[in-house]
Image (cartoon, rainbow, N blue to C red):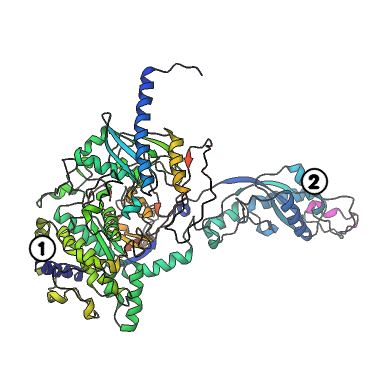
Amino acid sequence: MATSSRRTAMWNVIQAIEPLDGNVVPVRTIQETRPPEGFEDAYVAEVNTRSASKVTKTLDIELPRDSARPLNHLRRFCKYEMLPDHVKSAVDEFRKKQTIATLPTLFCILGPPLPDAEYMRALLDPYTPVPRARSRSLSPTASHHSKEPPASETSRPEKWPELFLFKIRVPIYPPSNAEVAELWSKTMWPVTFNPAAAPSTVVPPPQVLSRAQKSIEPRAGYYLALAREIAKESKQIGRGRGVGAVIVDPDIESRIDNNAWEEGYNSRERWMQAVIAVAGDCRFARSEGRGPYRDYHLPPDAPATAYYGYKVDKEGGPDLHALMRAIELVARVRRGDPDHQVSMSNRYCMPVVFSDPQLAERLSPLEEYFLYEAGNHAIPGDSTSSISSTPTSSLSPRKRKLDEPNPEVTSSLDAQVGTEQPSSTPLPAPPPSTATALPDSTSSQLLPADGVESSLASLRIRTRAQGGYLCTDLDVYLSHEPCICCSMGILLSRFRAVIFPRAGRMESGGLASEPIVRPSPVQKETNTDTQTAPDDQASDGAENPERPYYGLHWRKELNWRALGFEFVEDETDDNLSNEGTFHA
Amino acid sequence: MAEIMDPADMVEDQRHMYFMKQALAMGESALLCGETPVGCVLVYKDKIVGSGMNDTNRSMNGTRHAEFLAIAEFLQIHQKTELQETDLYVTVEPCIMCASALRQYKIRKVYFGCANDRFGGTGGVLTIHSDPSIDPGYPVQGGIFREDAIMLLRRFYIQENGKAPNPRPKKNRELNTTFDNGDGFVFTA
């Protein structure tokens, strides 16, 4: 009965969640925000247009391009009109000295690396510009020369124009976007920008990114609001800082979407069904080094200042961060532990710790609800519902006991729920037996009687035996930008995507790749009043401009990558975090 | 090169070698358990106060690296603040995740065997131990029994991965026992 009332309380908390309003935007990769810039020397030579294909062949043989550095972004030939200004003026200077007008020419790039000039002169000698038969010089000084020997392509004239060979500096890496391409084309040498050409190590393939973004957008506001609710719970219980993590299975989301069409419900309202695990920060819940682990909480009346600032010696480490605990909760189901305590050690093989360092046995009410009870919601179109009768259910009473939240934890949260409710719109409390059952639930998927927990978690988190592996293909929504340690933990766990609110950016974070660049509507509106435009970067909320930007989610050096998204709320104050500096 | 070594340095070297051997022994255990063979020990006042090995396959938790297990063992008995006088000996350079965790836990110094060119967080890929951060940095020293650490990894990666959807036959592969001058190991995981 205690269970059902707690379940009802949790259900009410979840029903009361209002989604954040805003947009999901990809976190650019560090390769995009800090593109490698390297420049090397090359020559520009002027050749006869009709010889272009021969020149190409000759250069392919004599100056083969390094396949590891194809330099495909550099145009090989361009017309005079396309040349950057400084090259144009060099050409103009050169032509002034020439006395012969030529047939149409092209400009060709040689290198990088910079080849030997004399070698190039010899190599290109057969393809140099060909004088016109009837000379019509380009430069005024040459206009008087009308007595050139008649030239044709077959007969070599007496006076062969000198080869125009000019040293320029060119970018050796492809441009990261069209603007850069345009700039380089104007100032260095014509380059092309091909968004599809970037290897997937540099940026996520565009179609992969947009597909994920489309699947994340509709419900991200709900998941992030839930993450904040988990954060609030952790803080209210006194277990940790206000940081929360929500793990979502995109596969369940798409099943919900598919079924919504057939059954005519609003799939957005079923957002909670795709949440497979949640976890809150627990850094105050383990007495650090005071003998075997035992619960230690900040007192309920701890002043707000207890949370402010970073007191490293009084906080647990990253293993107690919300993300790390959420990962362990998923792992715990994957292992299909019949008995958690035994599973932590396989002593004759493993000379290692066999306790529960991440407090995965002591779940908060919301953590327990989503890991074990939310599974009782019917999953639309689930073909694997037969799994619910797997033999593991016989072991559940034991698990149940272990999962029983700490009584003081429950009471403090219940008290909180009780006090909060009058202020919010009172929701009709559903009868306990159907509290978590959604309207489309078939009777076989309804909640079993209290205390008889079937292992429904396995419906949603596949065990090792069912092919589940780490956090493969899952998404994680966080209330804050994760610390470097947790950011790398996301990659090592093989998540598909990580999403956090921009307002939760942290100085110690590992995912952001650049300072927040805000469109400045204020600037536009006030432009008429004053000429001095406000500095975007300086007015950038509480973000420390000196913070490092790792963009760990998608770095070419690393073996694993995850898609990264920020949620930009429509209305948000500029206080990125009101708890000061710490690791989230 | 016949320099005479300071006896104090020799003692110090012996110390590092002794503890690294213990870390390598943990790596051997990992290999026996089918885990990526990385092992470590935490040393406080000349005593091993925590040890760990990679445990990701058994635990189904990709974050259970040797360093995390060693710290968990350490914290069962010791104060967290005592990590500030504790050194880590680990067979492979800590990954970015562990490099950050060690910094947040304020480790005193990290000694490692071979570098980690794929995930290394103390010089291999990133320099988390010395980057600007809200925690003080820590010094690192690599190369202690580097070849032994690499051999452990090679012995692991030459095995066939029965769990892979299409296991690559590796019967014809021979264990490479030569070393070049670089000091890294390229993980193929």
Up-down: is A471 above or below A5? above
Where residue B123 appears, as percent x and y from the top left, is 43, 39
Left or right: B85, with A206 as reference point: left
Q: Which residue is mark 2?
A: A122
> Please, what is the dominant secondary structure of the magenta stretch?
loop
Q: Which residue is mark 1?
A: A414
> Going 19% across and 42% down the picture, which residue do you hit?
A288
Left or right: A445, with B12 as reference point: left
Number of marks in picture: 2
Q: Is residue B62 visible?
A: no
> Going 20% across and 66% down the picture, which residue do you hit?
A394
Check whether the beta carbons of the residues at disc 1 and disc 2 lie within 8 A of each other. no
Asked whether A367 falls inside the magenta stretch, the response is no
Nearer to us in this view, A274 or A448: A448
Q: Which residues are magenta?
A: A139-156
Q: Chain of mark 2?
A: A
Up-down: is A5 above or below B36? below
> Going 8% across and 62% down the picture, which residue do you hit?
A415
Q: Quadrant of residue B113?
A: top left
Nearer to us in this view, A296 or B114: B114
Local secondary structure at mark 2: helix
Q: Where, quadrant-wise, is the N terminus of chain A in this rendering? A: bottom left
Local secondary structure at mark 1: helix
Q: Quadrant of residue A41?
A: top right
